Amino acid sequence: MITFSKQQLKIPKMQRPVYLVTAGQSKFDRAIPDKRTEELCIDSFTMAAKLLDISPAELKSYIHSCYYGHFADHFGDQLLGESVIHDRLGLDPLGNVGVKTGGATGGSTLWEGAKAVASGYSDCVLVMGWERMDEVPTDEGNFLISCAADKDWESPLGHIYTGYYAVMAQRYWQIFGKSEESFRKTLAEIAVKHHGYARFNPFAQSPMKITVDDVLKSPVVAYPLRALDCCLMSVGAACAILCDEDTAFKLTKNSKNKPLRIWVSAGSHTLRPADRRDMAIPLLPNETADQYKDLGERFPGGERYPGFTGFLAARMAAYYAYGMTGVQDPTEDLDVVELHDAFTISDVQTYEDIGLRPYGHGRDYVESGDCYHTNPHTGQPGKLPSNLSGGLIGCMHAVGATGIMQTFEIATHLWNRWAEMHGDQRLWDQFNRQKPEDWTDLQVKGAKRAMAISHAGVGSHVTSTILMDPDHLLKKDA
Amino acid sequence: MSMFGQVTVKNNQYKLKGAFHHMTPNTPIRDADNGWKLLGITNPRDMTYIHSYGGEAIFFESLSQGKLLATRCDSKDCETAGTIYIPFRIHCPECLGKNTVIDLTDIAKKTAKVHTFMTCARSGAFNLLDKPIRFINIEFDGVATILMSYLSIGDPSIGMKVVPIFKTSGPTFTILDLSWVPEGTSREQLPEGFSF
């Protein structure tokens, strides 16, 4: 579709408010040979109950329907894996459904769960996601992931998803990055930041204290992307509990968790980048049509939208989400974000799609220092810190769990429980990981509003999850 | 019995001949750091899928005959009528009418150029292309879409003029039968089995 009808551009309206009351996650790692998937799922659920200071059995008694995100059945060689987990959680005979939208599976699962509560079908739902990517060797894993591309037109070309993605990165690098060494260093900074923040996260798979030079010297995967620019392949699980208002306040009455309002929106675009036709840029509230009139002059080759450089699905998810919640300018209105940094370059592309910076200027979000917990140029808090979990590059990409992990992370800031969730020595010991001596509290002080972006493939599905402290909404009827 | 499974269609039914799977035993996974305790089991499996190209079959057949086909919406009521698609689309994404199959070979030979590219030193398991793989995405005059393929000769760059080559000898009947070379490449330089 290259033009949209009024009906299609309607801002979604939830029939009643939906709240996130708790969330949890397992350890994330490249392989977890000593645990079955159900054990990881139960770990995450147990943690969610613990954050409410109730038992898992009591939490289960509130749940009315279940939404499970698990992308790649063929990795685990188990169809209906959702049914296995549902049974092991002891949630029969409640209704449950599996959700699959590639890398956006976690976000899409939240989308389904939120709609179930908003519609009144359920007052309390379980949203859980997981992935098990250690059941095949890495090259076979790459083969299985490439099956998410078109099997006749793309997959035979290398059977490697990075290649299908990297052509987009190459175009962005040349058009908007102008192949500048300074832009390449900016990309490397993102990898340094995300591996660095992962050092303070006991759940994270790839904590690393590295420099820009280390990134630039890491092996080339697909030029200009190097190994340290790329996301992880992971095993792990995450969950969230969504409720209506009455249930939310009942469940949290003895807990430090304040119920948080949650909205989830979704967008999509062609599975094959090949099929993308030119169209006008759909505008976000902080943009005007005039500002893009000369985009092709400022960035020769950049006049084609979305082409191979923009993610229309992300733009549409943001359009719906900002409309639902009253966000006018995400950099001003939000306090912390978790973005889908599959690759450093797609992180930059996403800054533009969701309006953190105008198209063509994504790099400024990093170079200004706004994306850091503490702005390295000023020593002051970053304007809108991103991926303090370490993101997909430093923390994990256990596909079905990723969007839920991001939501867990932003919620811990809004609950003011980030330090407790990441600094507790018992967690580090439990995961057999060394807490660094310079462990730093990354709590975003006073955080009231946050967003997580969950993204699939080369942009086929994207969701935007927005959380807000209910006492700090941006519009009354949200 | 043939080593590899073969499939034909007779009376609109698949007829299978040969071996479609190969049996390999399971083996235990043991913990070398913990008294060789049992942790799991390997599950080897070798299967052959039976896949229909449906309405795209003509595209893949034509590659082996040196032709590059595309489709065009000719529905008179469609807002985007006249749009040309490659990858081949059986139906128009707007009106969902059946598209017309057109021969794009001459347009490709005259106007194809690289929109973007990537050189990749790795591939996933089971891939048949030589490495490094030079992915290219190709734009054509008058075509709305940008085709993904691979360059067989030379180093790609954005804007580079390329021409299609086809595996007319020993075709695989997959998208790998279509490749590209820089404009000006001679017939003698082409990879084995390929022709212009």
Image (cartoon, coloured by chain):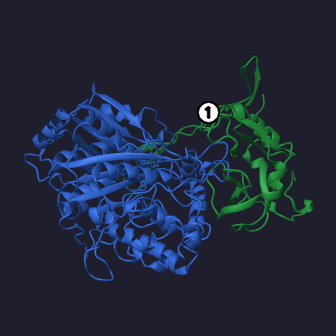
Q: Residue at x 49, y 74 (%)?
A: A215
Pointer 1 chain: B
Q: Is residue A404 above or below residue A181?
A: above
Q: In which image quadrant can residue A452 be found?
A: bottom left
Quadrant in the rendering for residue B112: bottom right
Say which colour chain B has: green
Q: Secondary structure at mark 1?
A: loop
Q: Amino acid at mark 1?
A: Leu
Q: Is residue A93 above or below residue A403?
A: above
Observer-nearest of A288 and B90: A288
For label 1, the crowd category at 10 Å Cα-Cα, with few meaning under 14, some 14 to 19 and many 20 or more, is few
Left or right? Give the position of B96 relative to A402: right
Q: Residue at x 37, y 67 (%)?
A: A207
Residue A257 point in image, percent of width and height: 15, 52
The answer to whether A273 appears left or right of A99 in the picture is: right
The x and y percentages for residue A391 are 38, 61
Query: What x and y, as percent, mark residue A135?
Result: 48, 46
Residue found at x 69% / y 38%: B73
Question: Total label count?
Answer: 1
User: In the figure, the blue chain has which letter?
Assistant: A
Is A239 on the left-hand or right-hand side of A254? right
Disc 1: which residue: B96
The foreground one among A346 and B49 is A346
